[in-house]
Amino acid sequence: MRDLLCCTHGKFHEIEFNSMVDHANILVTPLIEEHRSLHARLAPFGGWMMPIQYSGIIEEHLWTRKHAGLFDICHMGEFLIEADLSKSNFEHLVTVGLKGMSLSSCRYGFMLNEEGGIVDDLLIYRISDTRWMAVVNAATTPGDESHIRKHSTGFERFENISTSLGKLDLQGPEAGAVLKSLAGAGIEKLKYYNFGYFTVLGEKIIVSRTGYTGELGYELYMPNEKIALLWKKILEDGRVKPIGLGARDTLRIEMGYSLYGQDIDAKTSPLEAGLERFIDWNKDFIGKSALLRQKKEGLSRRMIYFMANSRRSPRHNYQIFYDAEDAGTVTSGSFSPSLGCGIGMGYVSREIAPGGQILLSEGSVSISAKVVNKPFYKNGSAKF
C-alpha cells in the first residue's frame, strides 16, 4: 500500500501518497455502494477507490486476529489460462514450478524481467491438467497481461477475466466456521494453499484456503453480479466485520509479507527480497541467468525486519542507520496492534544479523529498533 498509511505514537493517519490521482478515471469495485452505506473511509489505491477503514484500523486489525474479517479484494486481477505444459512455455514465464502442482492446488511465485526484477508476484491455481487461473495485483494487471501476451507461446487460451470476477477474502480464526454455514460440509477439509468448488448462494464458486493475514483464511471468487449478495450474506454473521485496506496492511506487515510496489518491484529481485524459496532452480525461466549472476557476485542489498523499542513507528523511506552509518531504507513500517510497538522492513547494503541494533530516521525523528526474524506475529491461526 504505497505510502498510504503511517503511524506515530500509536495513532494512524492518512498521508499524501499519490498527488497525481486521476479522479475522473478512477475505478470502483461492485461493492462501492456497500462501503458507502457502511460509512467506510474511501481513498484511491492502485487506480481504484477502496475502503481504507470502517470502525478504525486498530479495531479492525484486532477483530480479524480474534474473530473473522471480510475484505473487498475485487480490484485484483485474474487471468484464465489454458496451456499444456509440454506444448507451451508457461513454465518459462514464472519462477514457481508448475509441473509438480497437484490439481486443486495453488502456488505463490513471480514473473520476472530479464534483469531478474519482479514484474509481479502472483498466485497460480491449477484447475485441471491444462487449465489454470493466475491472480495478480490490481495496479499491475494491464502490464501483466501485456507481459504474458508478449512472451507466451503455445497457449490455447489466455483471457483477462478481471472485470467479470469478484473476490472476497474472509480471514480470522472463526472464518472456517462462518464459511461452513454458507458452503456446507467439506470446507473444513480444505488444506492450506488448496482450493475447491463449493455452492454458495446457488452459485458454484472457487474457494481457496489462502490469504494475506497469517490467520485461517479463505478467498472466494464469485461473478461480479452476485458479489454484493455474498458480501451482505457473510456480514449477517455476528462473528464477521468488514475490514479495510488499512488493517490489511498492518496484518500483512506483522507477518512480514511483501507488498508489490512498495517492498518489491521491477528493480528488486526475489533474492534481495529474501524470497528465494519461491524459485524453482530446476527449470528455466525469464530472469534466471540474472539471478544466478546475483548469487555468484553477491547481493548489493538485502531485506531485513525490525522491531522498534517503543510504540513509535517508521514510515516508508525512513533511513536505516547501523553503526552510525547510513545502511539502507525502510519500505514498510507500522504500529503493530498485536504487539504494541513499531515494526517494519527495509533494504540494507550490509549484513545485519538478528539482534543488531539500528536507528530509523527522517529529519528530526529517530527511532531505535532491533533486527529480528519474521514473522513478527507468531500466534496466527493459519496453521501452515
Image (spheres, rainbow, N blue to C red):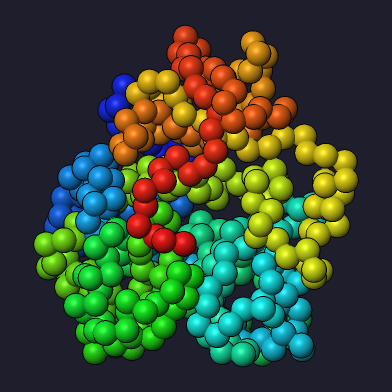
Q: Is residue 154 left or right of residue 352?
A: right
Please tell me whether residue 118 is drawn above or below residue 85 in the rendered image. Answer: above
* Residue 353 visible in the snapshot: yes
* Residue 49 visible in the snapshot: no
Q: Which residue is found at the position 25% from the left and 73% from the top?
A: 179
Q: Position of residue 262 (x, y in %)?
A: 54, 42
Q: Position of residue 350 (x, y in %)?
A: 72, 27
- Image quadrant assignment for residue 96: bottom right
Q: Position of residue 384 (x, y in %)?
A: 46, 62
Q: Which residue is found at the position 32% from the left and 79% from the top?
A: 187
Please tell me whether residue 237 is drawn above or below residue 116 in the rendered image. Answer: below
Q: Is residue 214 left or right of residue 52?
A: right
Please tell me whether residue 127 is drawn above or below residue 319 in the rendered image. Answer: below
Q: Which residue is found at the position 53% from the left and 33% from the top?
A: 372
Q: Position of residue 197 (x, y in %)?
A: 38, 86
Q: Which residue is found at the position 12% from the left and 68% from the top?
A: 236
Please tell me whether residue 9 is drawn above or below residue 5 in the rendered image. Answer: above
- Image quadrant assignment for residue 152: bottom right
Q: Is residue 84 left or right of residue 250?
A: right
Picture quarter with the N terminus: top left
